[in-house]
Amino acid sequence: MILGILINVLGLYCVKVYIREVSIKPMNLAIIDMGTNTFHLLLVKAENETFEIFHKEKIAVKIGANGINQGIINDAAIERCISALKSFKKQIDTANIHEIHAIATSAVRNAKNQQFLIQRIKEEVGIEPRVISGMEEAAYIHYGVCKALNIGAEVCLIMDIGGGSIEFIITKGTQPLWMKSFEIGGQRMMEKFHRNDPITSTEISAIENYLEINLHPLFEACELYGPKTLIGSSGTFDTLSEIHQKKMNKYGQAHATELPITQNSMIQIFHELIVKNKVERLLIAGMIELRVDMIVVASILIQFILKKTGLETTRISSYALKEGVLLQTITPLKIQTTPISKILKYD
């Protein structure tokens, strides 16, 4: 029976994480991450808590475009969503898949027409997505990152920039100390502030003022726990690493779970991104069209976090939400209970 990962606030404020009990026999799994900008598909052979990804793809669905700040998924975005999921389903149907785990995040969980979209997906695609909370999203990301990187006993700040939300987790080794999801993702900020291309200094100041106000709980938590290393996960950080590798002409290993980056190189890339327009950004080696729009506000966000917190080093995990979902799915059942007074100290 699949329990997935459930985070419930119960009684004396406890977070309980339930993880499925897995059969020892081999099984094929499909993991679908329905992100605000990008949908991801993983097809996986799993056995005894190990796995092999035999197919992966992503589609720029942009489900939150022109509607996310109004709490709606517009008609065109719904059609793109259905089309992408039908494409994924064709891959799934040819791969002898035993279980499908489809996860919907910020754009869907905040949409007034969420139920309409979910019903259409069930009827037209034959998949029933699970809409997860921001806390569930943060917990999955934490699990994925901790499996990807050897953090040791260091206190780190994990940051995952989505189109709809941003998840921050302060962790000491694999033990989460604090986590929170903020509904101020890249697509939301881009539609609010990024009206000129290249972005103007006035728009940058407006973004920084917005972050100063909205990320106050994060800055308080960083003062309390004192993380020294930033760990980035998901699309923007992947692209920053690609650009860094092209500039240095030095490449990481294929299928590595940690991607190459240096903090100095990342800051230099930020300075380049904010003075270029879209056409010029696309000419940067390592840039992909999927990221070319949102990477500007995402870079301003990362640079602001570095300045505010004094984080000294940066690492990048190639695992994030979808890998966290996968890894939790193939892990034997256990219950981990952490006082929510610690996890949500500043919520």
Image (spheres, helix red, strand yellow):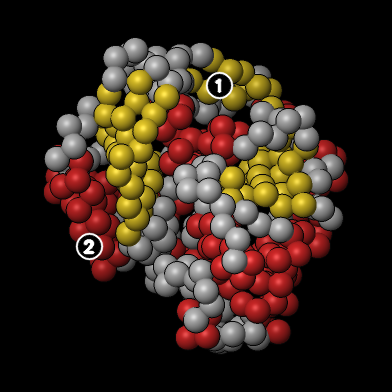
Q: Residue at x 76, y 64 (%)?
A: 264
Residue most toward the front? 249
Q: On the picture, is 86 further left or further right than 136?
A: left
- Report if residue 304 is visible in the image: no
Return the residue at label 1: 16
Within 10 angstroms of label 1, few (less than 14), some, or many (20 or more) residues?
A: some
Q: Which of the two residues, 239 or 158, is positioned nearer the viewer here?
A: 239
Q: Is residue 18 above or below residue 304?
A: above
Q: Is residue 286 above or below residue 204?
A: above
x and y, in percent, of residue 108 in the image: 38, 51
x and y, in percent, of residue 240 in the image: 59, 63
> So how many labels did they put on this image?
2
| Residue 79's disc number | 2
Q: Residue at x 46, y 51 (%)?
A: 106
| Quarter of the picture holding the N terminus | top left
Q: On the picture, is 48 further left or further right than 150?
A: left
Q: Amino acid at mark 1?
A: Lys
Q: Is residue 234 above or below residue 77?
A: above
Q: Secondary structure at mark 1?
A: strand
Residue 277 appears in which quarter of the rendering?
A: bottom right
Gap in angstroms between the C-alphas marked 2 and 1: 36 Å
Ranked by sequence position, the earlier of labels 2 and 1 is: 1
Residue 78 appears in which quarter of the rendering?
A: bottom left
x and y, in percent, of residue 123 in the image: 14, 45
Q: Which of the two residues, 345 or 63, is positioned nearer the viewer here?
A: 63
